[in-house]
């Protein structure tokens, strides 16, 4: 399960979020488990010190962490595409992910330090993959938001089709036959990984 909470706060609060999502809290009566998520989303805009407790919690729990890098909503361009110096903000956020990716590296060569990269701006996917070669991408925006499966090829790490996790909720849940819609999406994505 991916807990899509987009958490991020000052370090002490981020540590509490990490405990609540993937860890546990010691009490006088023994440990109390958190949500038990397999992965969660985080907002890195408070900076590295706020992100560190979340990375530590993910590492300790063997969980994944997806940082917001270039989201799928139309307003993402208002902030995430703005230049900071000579680079767009989403590239700086990708650097934060790439810098921490080795700390959550798995046996497959992919990292549990992933990135939320929306399908609605496919022109960024190749560059994002180049900046974060070992990170799994959580890709929202396919279907109801207008993103198309056939545009996601540049997001796939060469030889590693499992390097993307596509989130398509409304287009599947609202379909006449949700099972068939999910299977159609799965088949089209596996063709990309060829």
Image: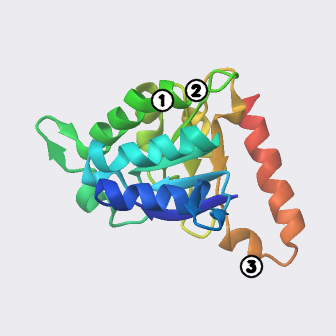
Please name the residue that numbered disc 1 is placed on: 101
The residue sitting at 47% across, 41% down in the picture is 56
Residue 191, compared with residue 171, is above or below; it is above
Residue 80, compared with residue 30, is above or below; it is above
Cβ atoms under marks 2 and 1 closer than 8 Å: yes
Cβ atoms under marks 3 and 2 closer than 8 Å: no
Q: Gap between marks 3 and 2, in whole Å? A: 36 Å
- Is residue 194 rendered to the left or right of residue 56? right
- Crowding at label 3, few (<14), some or many (≥20) Cα neighbours within 10 Å? few
Cβ atoms under marks 1 and 3 closer than 8 Å: no
Q: Gap between marks 1 and 3, in whole Å? A: 35 Å
Q: Position of residue 64 (x, y in %)?
A: 59, 44
Q: Gap between marks 2 and 1, in whole Å? A: 6 Å
Q: Which mark is residue 174?
A: 3
Q: Position of residue 128 (x, y in %)?
A: 43, 35
Decide which of 56, 184 is in the foreground and name it. Answer: 56
Please name the residue that numbered disc 2 is placed on: 105
The residue sitting at 60% across, 54% down in the picture is 22
């Amino acid at each position: 399960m991916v807990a899509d909470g987009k958490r991020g706060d000052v370090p002490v609060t981020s540590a509490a979020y990490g405990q609540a999502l993937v860890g546990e809290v010691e009490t006088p009566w023994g440990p109390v488990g958190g949500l038990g998520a397999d992965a969660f989303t985080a907002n890195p805009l408070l900076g590295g010190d706020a992100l560190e407790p979340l990375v530590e919690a993910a590492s300790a729990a063997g969980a994944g962490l997806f940082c917001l890098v270039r989201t799928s909503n139309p307003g993402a361009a208002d902030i995430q595409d703005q230049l900071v110096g000579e680079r767009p903000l989403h590239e700086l956020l990708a650097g934060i992910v790439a810098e921490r990716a080795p700390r959550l590296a798995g046996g497959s060569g992919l990292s549990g330090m992933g990135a939320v990269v929306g399908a609605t701006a496919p022109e960024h996917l190749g560059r994002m993959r180049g900046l974060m070669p070992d990170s799994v991408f959580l890709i929202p925006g396919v279907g109801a938001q207008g993103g198309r499966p056939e545009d996601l090829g540049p997001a796939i790490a060469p030889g590693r089709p499992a390097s993307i996790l596509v989130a398509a909720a409304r287009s599947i849940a609202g379909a006449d036959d949700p099972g068939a819609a999910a299977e159609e999406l799965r088949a089209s994505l596996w063709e990309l990984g060829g």
